[in-house]
Image (spheres, rainbow, N blue to C red):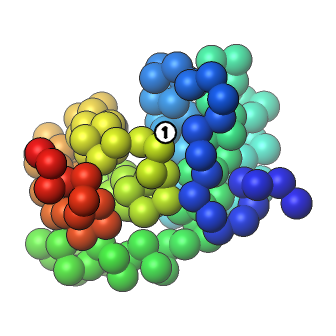
Amino acid sequence: MSAIDDNTPQPAPSGQPKAGDRRRARALALQGLYQRHFSKSSISDIEAEFMVDNDMAKVDLLYFRDLLRGVHREQVDLDQLLEPYLDRPLQEVDAIELAIVRLGAYELKHRLDVPYKVVINEGIEMAKRFGGTEGHKFVNSVLDKLSRRLRLAETRSR
């Protein structure tokens, strides 16, 4: 079993990945999660489809797989973490914004190698790119509040 399959946070691999490679991994994982929301295809089928249909040369593949599989695997737990910070019922959250905050929640919880400010900023940027007009404000609010819970020591120093 590979390290990516277990539930433990993954350390950054030796030789830091490029920010752009991680950004592309997040964007593809987001699109995969969004597709899963509507298609109900298996996560492994979605992953395989993305691997074939996209140029993965400049994508942090381990990160893509960790995010896609991890968010899918922990969706119920992530939703429970997020619900206290939502301004509406979970079912009423736009599908793309929901995928973004789930992805951010997963990173805040498991990817301690990624600073909380980076997680929030990446979520905001994805919401601006893929979401509705005001979606980035929602994403910012939810992830900022959640970061104070999951990364208390880190957020205290801000």
Quick one: 121 or 32, which is closer to the camera? 121
Q: Residue at x 47, y 20 (%)?
A: 20
Q: Quadrant of residue 17?
A: top right
Query: Quick one: label 1, few (<14), some, or many (20+) residues within 10 Å?
Result: many
Q: Residue at x 42, y 63 (%)?
A: 109
User: In the figure, is residue 92 to the left or right of 114?
Assistant: left
Q: Residue at x 69, y 24 (%)?
A: 56
Whether residue 14 is visible, yes or no, is yes
Question: In the rendered picture of this protein, how many numbered marks are placed on residues?
Answer: 1
Whether residue 131 is visible, yes or no, is no
Most distant residue in the right direction: 1
**Image quarter of the C terminus:** top left
**Image quarter of the N terminus:** bottom right
How far across and how far down the image is residue 84, in percent?
20, 80
How far across and how far down the image is residue 105, in percent?
37, 61
User: In the figure, is residue 26 to the left or right of 151?
Assistant: right
Quick one: 101 or 108, which is closer to the camera? 108
How far across and how far down the image is residue 108, in percent?
38, 56
How far across and how far down the image is residue 59, in percent?
62, 25
Q: Quadrant of residue 74?
A: bottom right
User: In the figure, is residue 48 to the left or right of 10?
Assistant: right
Dot 1: what SS?
Answer: helix
Mark 1 belongs to which amino acid? Answer: Arg
Q: Which residue is mark 1?
A: 26
Quick one: 106 or 130, which is closer to the camera? 106
Q: Residue at x 47, y 36 (%)?
A: 27
44 lies above or below 117: below
